Image: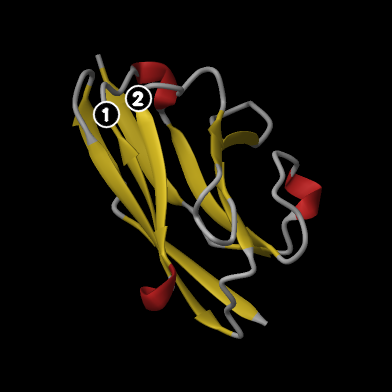
Amino acid sequence: QVQLVESGGGLVQAGGSLRLSCAASGRTSSNYHMGWFRQAPGKEREFVARISGNGVITSYADSVKGRFTISRVNAKNTMHLQMNSLKPEDTAVYYCAAAEKYYSVYRSDYEYWGQGTQVTVSS
């Protein structure tokens, strides 16, 4: 059993930056792959970024590539998403997630989810 809690969301102007954090507790493991997903009003939850258990491998959705950076500090059981050059279309609830087996872009491969944190980007 793993618990995930996101923080760092808020309201920011277009072009600004936010840094989201995800704190893990319970039966955590550096073997777990982790990811960020987001869900905008009226849309399906979509993949944003992923990071392998050892933190060496990362990938991003095309829509955020070059603007967002995913990282993790396994010794502190934390993960971060640095979001720069934010756009109004980035507005969504952002969720962190952990997967026991797969380094994946698919929601179904993640067993553990946080409650989400709201990110709103104004024009």
Q: Identify the image quadrant of the N terminus.
A: bottom right
Q: Residues within 10 Å of mark 1 (few under 14, many from 20)?
A: some
Q: Residue at x 54, y 62 (%)?
A: 114
Q: Earlier in the sequence, mark 2 or mark 1?
A: 2
Above/below status of 95 relative to 46? below
**In the image, is 40 to the left or to the right of 111?**
left
Give the x, y percent position of residue 110.
Answer: 72, 56
Q: Label for residue 2? A: none
Q: Residues within 10 Å of mark 2 (few under 14, many from 20)?
A: few
**Nearer to us in this view, 6 or 83:** 83
The residue wearing badge 1 is 84
Q: Based on the displayed image, in which of its 4 quarters is residue 69 positioned?
A: top left
Label 2: element kind: loop
Q: Are marks 2 and 1 in contact (CB under 8 Å)?
A: yes
**In the image, is 86 to the left or to the right of 56?**
left
Give the x, y percent position of residue 22.
Answer: 42, 61
Amino acid at the residue labelled 1 = Asn
Could you tell me if residue 10 is visible in this image? yes
Give the x, y percent position of residue 103.
Answer: 70, 49
**In the image, is 115 to the left or to the right of 71?**
right
**Nearer to us in this view, 91 or 66:** 66
Above/below status of 105 relative to 114? above
Q: Residue at x 54, y 61 (%)?
A: 54
Q: Based on the displayed image, in which of its 4 quarters is residue 82 positioned?
A: top left
Label 1: element kind: loop
Amino acid at the residue labelled 2 = Arg
Q: Label for residue 67? A: 2
Q: Residue at x 56, y 71 (%)?
A: 30
User: Gap in Å between the C-alphas at discs 2 and 1?
Assistant: 5 Å
